[in-house]
Image (spheres, helix red, strand yellow):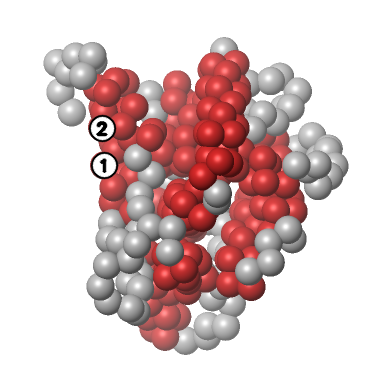
Amino acid sequence: MSDTLTHPDEGASFAADQDAALRHWTYDTPGPVRIGSDEHRQMFCKMLLETHDPYRPAVLDWPKLEPDALKRLTSLPIWNIAVQTEGRASIRVQTYAETVRDPLLRAALEMDAGEEARHKVVLSHLVAAYGIELAPEPAYPPPPKPEWAWMFTGYSECIDSFFAFGLFRSAQRSGYFPAALVETFEPVIQEEARHILFFVNWVAWYRKTMPWWRRPWHSVRVAGIWFMLVWERLAIARGIDANGVAHDSNFLPANRETIGAALEPREMLELCLKENDQRMSGYDARLLRPTFVPALARFALRFMKRSNKRA
């Protein structure tokens, strides 16, 4: 993914090393780490900073697609939502970062914001490479409540990334996305795993460090965010806005009918759980993992019958 490679063998080796660095990380201090401690803050911040992949979207090699694959890609009604979602996520994280005084935490948040902005550029280059026309982008003003906007973005990604992991793998297995395109886009999906890992550890650390009398109000705010997120996803499940007006939702969960059609709902949830665990497995075991959405998925599986359909 680097832009500094020349020799093919050296390039392949460097790319493999960079990919391993993106997916595997261990904190350099051994022993238990207390959640909410200063060391916990250092651990989850360093995880994000030290696993950064310094690729540039301009040098990504978008493969030439066969006509049927190109038609499948360009016919997805997702691209306006996808680009605008990343644009809003970037400004929300950056705005909150500017309110943070701690240098290490601020650097990690700025890295997160920069990667969200880079995702938007990657998507913009993808649609340009394959002749997909986008609606004019709206402005992305800084949110008036930075902390609320940061938490809203983080919890939103916890939901969307969980389903995106499974749908992305389903699309790869079914051939809906060609292998070369999957390989090009794969690091973007893994970066989202890092983002939600960083976020859930920030939430736990932040709650532990706030005065006890503020915690009830914090819980109310979090409950409000979850209510809004569930409401939005119920709305988006009824159909994507015909004008491409972006909701605060990633695009993959809304497209199971096309991308993940080969799988029954139970199979899809099982694949999402497997992919979620796999993408988190390479990072230090002392870091907290997202639990709420996986727990809901496991609960839902109790009420779903196994399909008799052969694989």
Where residue 246 appears, as percent x and y from the top left, is: 70, 31
State the SS at label 2. Answer: helix
Where disc 1 sits, the SS reads helix
Up/down of 88 relative to 41, above or below: above
Residue 104 appears left or right of 87: left
Q: Is residue 35 above or below residue 267?
A: below
Which residue is labeled 2 in the image?
270
Residue 97 in sight: yes
**199 sits left or right of 163 in the view:** right
Whole-percent x and y of residue 9?
39, 83
Picture residue at 58% right of the left edge, 41% below the top: 214
* Callout 1 amino acid: Lys
* Residue sitting at x 67%, y 40%: 148
Q: Which residue is mark 1?
A: 274
Residue at left offset 29%, top offset 38%: 273
CB-based contact (under 8 Å), mark 2 and mark 1? yes
Between 129 and 236, the one lying in front of the other is: 236
For marks 2 and 1, give the CA distance: 6 Å
Neighbourhood count class around disc 1 (C-alpha, 10 Å): few under 14, some 14–19, many 20 upward: some
Crowd band around label 2 with a 10 angstrom C-alpha radius: few (<14), some (14–19), many (20+): some
Instruction: Please name the amino acid that badge 2 sits on.
Output: Glu
Q: Quadrant of residue 201?
A: bottom left
Q: Position of residue 94 (x, y in %)?
A: 71, 56
Residue 284, position as x, y percentages in the image = 31, 65
